[in-house]
Amino acid sequence: MRVTRALGAAVVLLGLAAAPAVADSSPSASPSEEGGAPTSAGTSFRTATEIEQGQRATANGSAGDYLYWSFPADAGQRPTVRATVELPETHAAETWRIDVYDGLRRRQACQWGAQTRTAAEGTPSVELACVLRTVRAWSEPWANDPLPGTYYVRLTAVDLPTSDLGVPVGAEVRVDSKDIGGAAAVDGSLSEPLVPGVAVRSGKDENDDSERGAVLSAIEPEDGWSSGWWSDRWVWTGVGGVLAALAGVGGYALTRGSGRPTRVPPAA
C-alpha cells in the first residue's frame, strides 16, 4: 500500500515538474494568428501578393506603378473587389483603374461598380469597385466565363500627368464574395482549379520528365475547393418531387368521389 502511494506521489511530482517545461516549449503564435495582413503588393502576375477573401490588404507605392494582388474564388461565388487609393495633398487630376484577371490571365468584365474613376485636383482619395460575374464550375473552352481558381487584381493610374509621375500613394484592397448557390450551378466541373504553378519539383535525375511536375500555389478557399457536383438545387429538386407527389395524391382523393352514385341502378 505504501509502495502504491509512493509511486502515485512520484507521478504527481513528475507531472508538476514537466508542466512548466511543456509550457516553455510551446510554439509562439504564427504571423497569421497574430492577425497580420499583407502590407505590400506585387509588381506583376508572378509576384502578386496573395490575400484571402475578407482580408484587408494595404500597400505603399508610387503613381505610375502596377500593383498586383491575388485571391481564390470558388464555384458559386460572386466576388466583389474594392480598392481605395490615398493620394498626396497636392496633385493634378488623376484617373485610376482596377482590373481583375482569372487564372488564365483573361481580363474579366465587371457587372457593375466604378472600375475607373478620376480624382479631381487635390482630392485626398479615390474609391474603386468591381463586381464580377458568378464563378462557374465548368464552361466551354471558347467562353470567357469566370472559373474556379486564382484571380488577380491590378491597380494602376492611367493617363497620369507627368507632374504626378512617381509621387507616393497608398492603396487598400479588400475582396468579398456573395454565395449564389444552386441558381448558378451547371452540370460539370473542372478537374483542377485554375491556379498558377509557382515552382517545379524534380527527382534525382533532372532529365527524367516522369518525376517532374508543377507545384501549385497554396492559396485556396478556407473550406477547400468544392467538388462542383453538389449544390442546393439538389435539395430543391427533392422538395419539388415530394410536393408533386403529395399534390397528385391529394388531387386523386378529391376527384375520385365517395363511390357509386345513388341514382345509378345496381347491375343485373
Image: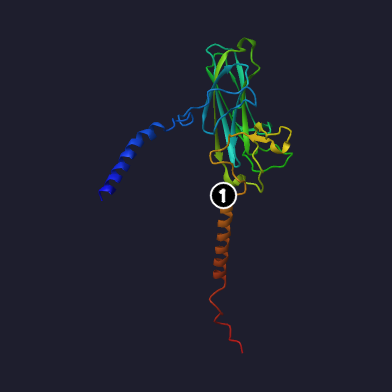
Residue at (65, 26) in percent of width and height: 46
For numbered disc 1, what is the local secondary structure? Answer: loop
Colouring rule applied to residues: rainbow
Residue at (52, 33) in percent of width and height: 54
Q: Is residue 197 above or below residue 186?
A: above
User: Looking at this view, is 13 or 22 the one in front?
Assistant: 13
Q: Which residue reaches farthest left?
A: 2
Instruction: Give the class, few, some or many, for how many residues have Cα within 10 Å of label 1's Cα (few <14, many ≥20).
Output: few
The location of residue 184, given as percent across then percent down, is 62, 44
The location of residue 171, given as percent across then percent down, is 55, 22
The location of residue 228, given as percent across then percent down, is 62, 46
Splitting the image into 4 quarters, where does residue 110 fall?
top right
Residue at (60, 12) in percent of width and height: 164
Count of picture labels: 1
**Residue that numbered label 1 is attached to:** 232
Residue at (55, 30) in percent of width and height: 51
User: Looking at this view, is 124 or 48 the one in front?
Assistant: 48
Q: Which residue reaches farthest top?
A: 163
User: Looking at this view, is 222 or 245 the one in front?
Assistant: 222
The location of residue 58, given as percent across then percent down, is 53, 23
Splitting the image into 4 quarters, where does residue 137 fall?
top right
Q: Which residue reaches farthest bottom?
A: 268
Residue type beneath disc 1: Asp
- Image quadrant in which the C terminus is located: bottom right
Splitting the image into 4 quarters, where does residue 67 fall?
top right
